[in-house]
Each structure stands twice: as structure tokens, then as C-alpha cells.
């Protein structure tokens, strides 16, 4: 599976171009796209959510969160914060879901580079 971040999903739905969009289109074509649970929450919580967007999000599989997830996420965030790097909670949870599942992440959010460098996240 290849995980998709909110930033790339929203850009895709908005008709934007980019390397992340090409990767997302390919992942969708080959039925490899999956969403970290936080991405599902972020997208489905939009107040005036387009029904087509909701249908797409609901049609994609979600990455599973296993036992010890929250503690591992806390350790990952602590590691980055200890280096005085940006580690927003939602980003940490997205990154940890990807790390745990071994899924690379499609994103256009540069904040994930810290998770790649220091926590083992793979970016597409």
C-alpha cells in the first residue's frame, strides 16, 4: 500500500499538478492507495464536504493502527521535538501509521522530511 497525505489528496481533488499527483494517480490506478486514519478524519471533517470527496475517501482502505501505536507516536514526536524540529501532532500520527505499516507516504507537505530523516518514514 501507498499512503496518501491530506495535502496531496486535496491538491489532487482540486485539479493541481505535480509529482505527488502523478504518484497518487498511479496508486489509485493500481489500487494501491490507502489513507492513514488521521487523513480520513481531516478530510471528512470539512464542514461543506463535497459528496464525491466523501465517497472517494470512504472507498479507500485505511492503514491499521495496532497495539502500542500511541506510545510509538509519542516517542517519534519526542525525538523530533528534542531536536527542535517541527512535529505537529496530526503529522506525527500520519507518519507513525505509515512507519508501522511500512507504507511510503505521498505528500506535498515538507514537514514530513524530518520524519523521513530521523524516524524512518519513507516518502514517495
Image (spheres, helix red, strand yellow):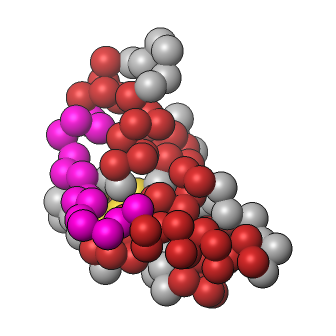
Q: Which residues are magenta?
A: 56-70
Q: Please tell me whether residue 68 belongs to the stretch shown in magenta.
A: yes
Q: Which of the 4 image quadrants contains residue 59?
A: top left
The N terminus is located in which quarter? bottom left
Residue 23 visible somewhere in the drawing: no
Residue 99 visible somewhere in the drawing: yes
Q: Which of the 4 image quadrants contains residue 109?
A: bottom right
Q: Along the line of sight, which residue is nearer the eye, 99 or 67?
A: 67
Residue at the top extreme, as displayed:
48
Q: Is residue 104 left or right of residue 67?
A: right
The residue shown at (65%, 55%) is 88
Q: Is residue 101 left or right of residue 106?
A: left
Q: Please tell me whether residue 97 belongs to the stretch shown in magenta.
A: no
Our reading of the magenta stretch's main secondary structure is loop
x and y percentages locating residue 6 in the rendered image: 49, 47
The residue shown at (54%, 44%) is 11
x and y percentages locating residue 38 in the rendered image: 42, 47
Amino acid at each position: 500500500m501507498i499512503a496518501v497525505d491530506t495535502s496531496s489528496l486535496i491538491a489532487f481533488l482540486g485539479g493541481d499538478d505535480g509529482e505527488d499527483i502523478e504518484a497518487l494517480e498511479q496508486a489509485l490506478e493500481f489500487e494501491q492507495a490507502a489513507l492513514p486514519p488521521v487523513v480520513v478524519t481531516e478530510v471528512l471533517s470539512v464542514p461543506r464536504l463535497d459528496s464525491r470527496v466523501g465517497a472517494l475517501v470512504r472507498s479507500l482502505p485505511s492503514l491499521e493502527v495496532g497495539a502500542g501505536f500511541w506510545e510509538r507516536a509519542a516517542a517519534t514526536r519526542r525525538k523530533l521535538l528534542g531536536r527542535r524540529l517541527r512535529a505537529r501532532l496530526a503529522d506525527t500520527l500520519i507518519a507513525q501509521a505509515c512507519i508501522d505499516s511500512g507504507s511510503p507516504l505521498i505528500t506535498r507537505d515538507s514537514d514530513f522530511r524530518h520524519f523521513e530523516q530521523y524516524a524512518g518514514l519513507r516518502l514517495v
